[in-house]
């Protein structure tokens, strides 16, 4: 268990590139965008209409097609488009400390271009994280197969992968729920995951998680889980951890195989060392492996009766 204490000096924030890949990825980033956010927003797609929102630090048009009409849900066309634009992608990623790629899998750019973009990203940046959305079951077996093939290709690039499951999301809605409501929920869930992720990197705390910590945990890649909860102080450590690990919208994650973890605790000024140790030990017991656990603590005077926990857990890729 590693504790990092924050000094009073304000460190220079790392250079973080948040990249929407393909139509789904770009749409999700438009929901996340905040002018005050300390990250660069980048759009990469083969369809020119993806760049209409005026929020982008940079844009990359994938491919040499002069009409820029997209890849027609063909992953091979998406792959070729990314290869043709590999130098533009590389230039866009220069001087990055962390690159976060966001994409919906199964389509032409999301499945075809994403592995190429991840490979280029790894050439210039050791910390590459992919937030991905699996297809809905009703989108067909072919699209699901494309998505699974993309997952295996991303493994080869040793990136960290967070997988949001549209299939599991559907289980939370009745059959009569409007599709637009379900799609909005997907966007909200992914937005929440990414904001939690970036928030840990860019915030300062009493016991701090700095970028070097994140690099240590994330640089070797792996299947990644993100969970968060906010509970009453007297709920109990075990219950608080269980609630934090109950993110039913992500693809299945085997906690027993976790070998790296980042834990951020936010609590009131009366938060004590005993509770901190209980939380860390409870989390370590969830895995059969020797976890490399980095912890941060942020004390907020307004949180008198509550404790908030955010956990990142990484393990070997799914077989």
Image (cartoon, rainbow, N blue to C red):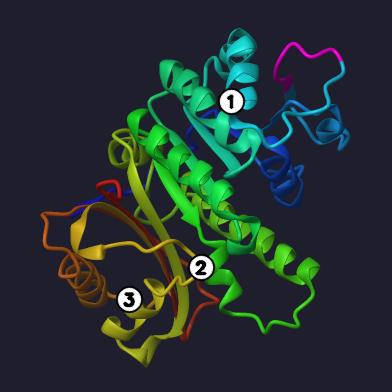
In the image, is 253 to the left or to the right of 134?
left
Dot 2 lies on which element? loop
Q: Residues within 10 Å of mark 1 (few under 14, many from 20)?
A: some
What residue appears at the point 25 percent right and 77 percent down from the top-left corner?
A: 275
Looking at marks 1 and 2 on the same chain, the residue that comes earlier in the sequence is marked by 1
Dot 3 lies on which element? helix
Q: Is residue 310 magenta?
A: no
What residue appears at the point 83 percent right and 21 percent down from the top-left corner?
A: 68
Pointer 2 residue: 249
Looking at marks 3 and 1 on the same chain, the residue that comes earlier in the sequence is marked by 1
Res 239 seen here: yes
Q: CA distance from mark 1 to mark 2?
A: 29 Å
Q: Which label is found at residue 114?
A: none
Q: CA distance from mark 3 to mark 2?
A: 17 Å
- Please identify the quarter of the rendering in which residue 235 is found: bottom left
Q: CA distance from mark 3 to mark 1?
A: 42 Å
Q: Residues within 10 Å of mark 2 (few under 14, many from 20)?
A: some
Q: Which percent across, then down, holds residue 39?
A: 63, 36
Q: Nearer the viewer, mark 3 or mark 2?
A: 2
Q: Is residue 65 magenta?
A: yes
Q: Is residue 210 above or below residue 49?
A: below
| Dominant secondary-structure state across the stretch colored magenta | loop
Pointer 1 residue: 76
- Write down the region rendered in magenta: 60-66
Pointer 3 residue: 241
Q: Which percent across, then down, holds residue 151?
A: 43, 41
Do tag 1 and tag 2 residues touch (Cβ < 8 Å)?
A: no
Residue 180 or 58: which is nearer the viewer?
180
What residue appears at the point 33 percent right and 79 percent down from the top-left corner?
A: 242
Res 202 seen here: no
């Amino acid at each position: 268990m590693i504790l990092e204490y924050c000094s009073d000096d304000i460190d220079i924030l790392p250079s973080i590139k948040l990249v929407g890949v393909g139509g789904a990825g770009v749409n999700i980033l438009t929901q996340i965008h905040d002018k005050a956010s300390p990250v660069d927003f980048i759009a990469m797609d083969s369809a020119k209409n993806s760049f209409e929102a005026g929020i982008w630090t940079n844009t990359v048009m994938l491919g040499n097609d002069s009409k820029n009409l997209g890849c027609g849900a063909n992953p091979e066309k998406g792959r070729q488009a990314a290869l043709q634009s590999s130098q533009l992608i590389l230039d866009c990623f220069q001087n990055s400390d962390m690159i976060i790629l966001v994409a919906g899998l199964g389509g032409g750019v999301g499945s075809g271009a994403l592995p190429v973009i991840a490979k280029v990203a790894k050439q210039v940046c050791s910390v590459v994280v992919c937030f991905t959305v699996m297809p809905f079951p009703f989108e067909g077996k072919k699209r699901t197969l494309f998505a699974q093939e993309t997952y295996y290709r991303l493994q080869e690039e040793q990136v960290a992968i967070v997988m949001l499951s549209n299939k599991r999301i559907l289980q939370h809605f009745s059959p009569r729920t409007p599709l637009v409501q379900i799609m909005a929920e997907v966007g909200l869930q992914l937005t929440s995951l990414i904001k939690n992720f970036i928030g840990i990197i860019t915030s300062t705390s009493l016991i701090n998680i700095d970028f070097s910590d994140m690099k240590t945990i994330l640089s070797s890649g792996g299947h990644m889980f993100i969970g968060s909860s906010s509970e009453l102080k007297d709920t109990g450590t075990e219950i608080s951890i269980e609630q934090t690990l109950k993110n039913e919208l992500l693809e299945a994650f085997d906690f027993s195989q976790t070998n790296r973890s980042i834990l951020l605790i936010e609590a009131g000024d009366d938060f004590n060392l005993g509770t901190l140790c209980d939380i860390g030990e409870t989390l370590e017991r969830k895995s059969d492996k020797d976890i490399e656990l980095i912890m941060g603590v942020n004390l907020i005077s307004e949180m008198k009766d509550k404790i908030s926990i955010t956990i990142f857990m990484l393990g070997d890729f799914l077989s």
